[in-house]
Amino acid sequence: MQKLSKNEKHFLESKELCRLATASADSVPHVTPVIYAMDGNKIVIVTDYGTKKLKNLKENPKASLVVDEYHPNRGVVILGDCQIYEKGKEYLRLLKILFAKFEYYRNNPWGEGEAPILKITPTKVISWGISSK
């Protein structure tokens, strides 16, 4: 796992939208905008059953995402390994993180087995316009 710098983590915690890239077993890429929350240095995303990203991650657990802005020009790219949770203790812990960040999720709650949660552990972090401290 590659650690985020304090400033990279602060930048990611201040945002909520990223573009998530996945690839199928035969390397066909797919990218989609998603909202996310932070769990320490890891990225937490909920998805629905039947999505292309979930199918891809079940075939190939590698993922990449980017969070950036144009003015000022800065951002973070994360390459990482994805774990998929559908129920259990870790699922419920991650669910609390998502509910804490997003009012929409609190107002429209779900439970175990209703929507998979993705947790991406960074293996490589690239940033620009953000101090590495």
Image (cartoon, grey):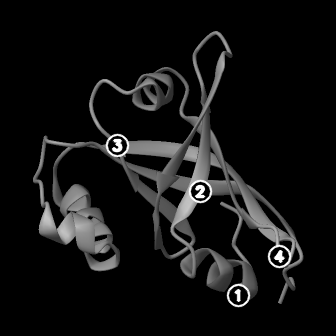
From the image, tell me which residue sits under label 2: 18
Q: Nearer the viewer, mark 1 or mark 3?
A: 3
Q: Are marks 2 and 1 in contact (CB under 8 Å)?
A: no
Instruction: Name the element at disc 2.
Output: strand
Categorize mark 1 by other alpha carbons within 10 Å: few (<14), some (14-19), many (20+).
few
Which amino acid does the dot numbered 3 rest on?
Answer: Thr
4 sits left or right of 54 in the view: right
Disc 1 + disc 3, Cβ < 8 Å: no
Residue at 75% across, 65% down: 76
Question: Is 3 located above or below residue 108 in the figure?
Answer: below
Location of residue 62 in the rendering, given as x and y in whole percent from the top left corner: 61, 36
Query: What residue is shown with label 3?
Result: 47
Instruction: Give the alpha-carbon distance from disc 1 to disc 4, as whole Å.
Output: 21 Å
16 to 46, vertically: above or below = below
- Marks 3 and 4 sit apart, C-alpha to C-alpha, by 29 Å
Q: Is residue 88 left or right of residue 131?
A: left
Label 3 or label 2, whichever comes before in sequence order: 2
Counting residues from the start of the chain, the first of labels 2 and 4 encountered is 2
Rounded to the nearest angstrom, the CA distance separating label 2 from label 1 is: 19 Å
Q: Residue type at mark 4: give it.
A: His
Give the percent coordinates (x, y) of residue 82: 51, 44
Image mark for residue 71: 4
Q: Amino acid at mark 2?
A: Cys
Label at residue 6: 1
3 relative to 107 in the view: left or right: right
Task: Please state which of the two labelled residues, at mark 1 or mark 4, is closer to the viewer.
Answer: 4
**Category of crowding for the residue at label 4, using alpha-carbon neighbours closer than 10 angstroms: few (below 14), some (14–19), many (at least 20):** few
